[in-house]
Image (cartoon, helix red, strand yellow):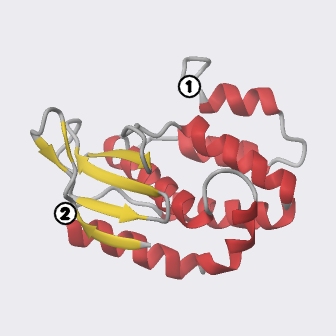
Amino acid sequence: MEIRRGTQFIENGTKQAIVEFVFTVYIIYVFQGTLSQFDIVIKYKKDGTRIRTPKHIHWVVDILMKMQGNEILTKNYLQAIQECWNSCVPLTNNDYDTLKVLIENGENDIDIEQYFPLNAFGEYDVEFLYVLMELLAVQEKTNRADAYMFGKIIEELLETERDIFKIIYTAGFGGRRG
């Protein structure tokens, strides 16, 4: 992964990305949000496609595919992500350096390379998923100290007797498209 200063613009060229995380076929963009001083807006795109706003359902489906391929390693990965969620604190700055360090330190803490075998399953590689999920978690906690959506989905995915319908319902925000 390459981390670079933002070059992408959105909203008719009025908003420039703060930071960009560049993977083999995907790029994650982080923009200044509007909900709070340190709010971030996350977007991503695959080569040759339009920029999208990530939804919980996107990564949930991918994680379920990884579970079909290697449930034990996927659960270990999810437990590491859950620890990130539990220790995640609201942003006190959302500049390039802060976001870069957040992701670099997190990848070192969870030793991301041990999960690379999961790249054989699903659409996204685990490094992309980690960056996306870390950013979604910090975004959620920055805007709502009592946020729970991300953590709740992880808990449901880690249950021994997963209820696929409950997981999809939660990831889709109560049945709304997501």
Tell me the kind of residue under disc 2. Answer: Asp
Tell me the kind of residue under disc 1. Answer: Phe
Q: Nearer the viewer, residue 135 or 69?
A: 69
Q: Position of residue 23 (x, y in %)?
A: 46, 65
As helix, strand or loop, the secondary structure at mark 2 comes to loop
List the residue tagged with mark 1. Answer: 173
Mark closest to the chain's N terminus, 1 or 2: 2
Q: Is residue 88 left or right of residue 58?
A: left
Q: Position of residue 100 (x, y in %)?
A: 31, 71
Q: Position of residue 47 (x, y in %)?
A: 44, 51
At x 23%, y 36%, the residue is 35
Q: Quadrant of residue 174?
A: top right
List the residue tagged with mark 2. Answer: 95
How far apart marks 1 and 2 lie (CA) works out to: 29 Å
At x 65%, y 51%, the residue is 123
As helix, strand or loop, the secondary structure at mark 1 comes to loop
State whether residue 65 is above or below residue 94: above
